[in-house]
Amino acid sequence: MLLRKGKQEDVSPIAEIWHLGWGDGHLGFVPQELVDVRTEESFRARASERVHEATVAVADGAIAGFVIVVDDEVEQVYVSAWHRGTGVADALLKEAERRVRANGHRKGWLAVVAGNARARAFYGRSGWHDEGPFEYAATAEDGPITVPCHRYTKFV
């Protein structure tokens, strides 16, 4: 597996992984208002806008997942369904922690939808601490949408 900066040609696989992974972890746990705006097209647009902020994992010649870090926030961590359980998520999360440090922070944070038990268990196993529930303001064209999440932190 190789980690590298995202490139323009990665937009389609990132959008697909993001869209499908978001559905796996969010459907049934977020307001319908957010589900309505998180269309396949919206993920393609977001991937196109943010591809150069991403670090992608390449396994067997394919994009296996990606991570986006903004300042001290691990904002996005997604792994394709075909690469879950292969170590891709661990490698991406370690890279995210490295980037938080490189951004000058000693402590990183991330938001996990309250009902996403699989992700919450993964972050717990990876040494992230659940600081409890909070309201995350998800971005949408018509303004933020409040999403019930848990805030996880880790000294990096």
Image (cartoon, helix red, strand yellow):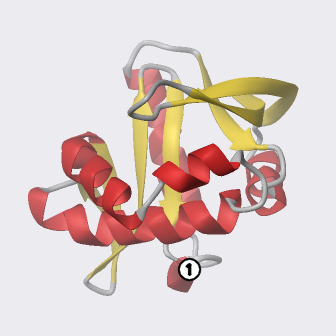
Q: Residue at x 75, y 29 (%)?
A: 151
Residue 88 in picture, x, y percent from top left: 51, 68
Residue 16 in picture, x, y percent from top left: 38, 71
Is the residue marked by circle 1 packed among few (<14), some (14-19), or many (20+) residues within 10 Å? few
Is label 1 in a helix, a strand or a loop? helix
Looking at the figure, which quarter contains the N terminus? bottom left
Q: Could one spot residue 2 in this view of the protein?
A: no
Q: Is residue 73 left or right of residue 126?
A: left
Where is residue 85, by image quadrant? bottom right
Residue 105 in picture, x, y percent from top left: 50, 14
Residue 48 in picture, x, y percent from top left: 20, 51
Q: Is residue 41 above or below residue 148?
A: below
Q: Residue at x 56, y 60 (%)?
A: 22
Q: Could one spot residue 27 in this view of the protein?
A: yes
Q: Residue furthest left?
A: 8
Q: Return the residue at label 1.
A: 81
Q: Is residue 128 above or below residue 64?
A: above
Q: Residue at x 78, y 63 (%)?
A: 118
Question: Label 1 sits on what residue type?
Answer: Ala
Viewer-proximal residue among 94 and 140: 140
Viewer-proximal residue among 33 and 23: 33
Viewer-proximal residue among 78 and 25: 25
Q: Residue at x 52, y 80 (%)?
A: 83
Q: Is residue 85 above or below residue 103?
A: below
Q: Is residue 3 above or below residue 12?
A: above
Q: Is residue 84 left or right of residue 49?
A: right
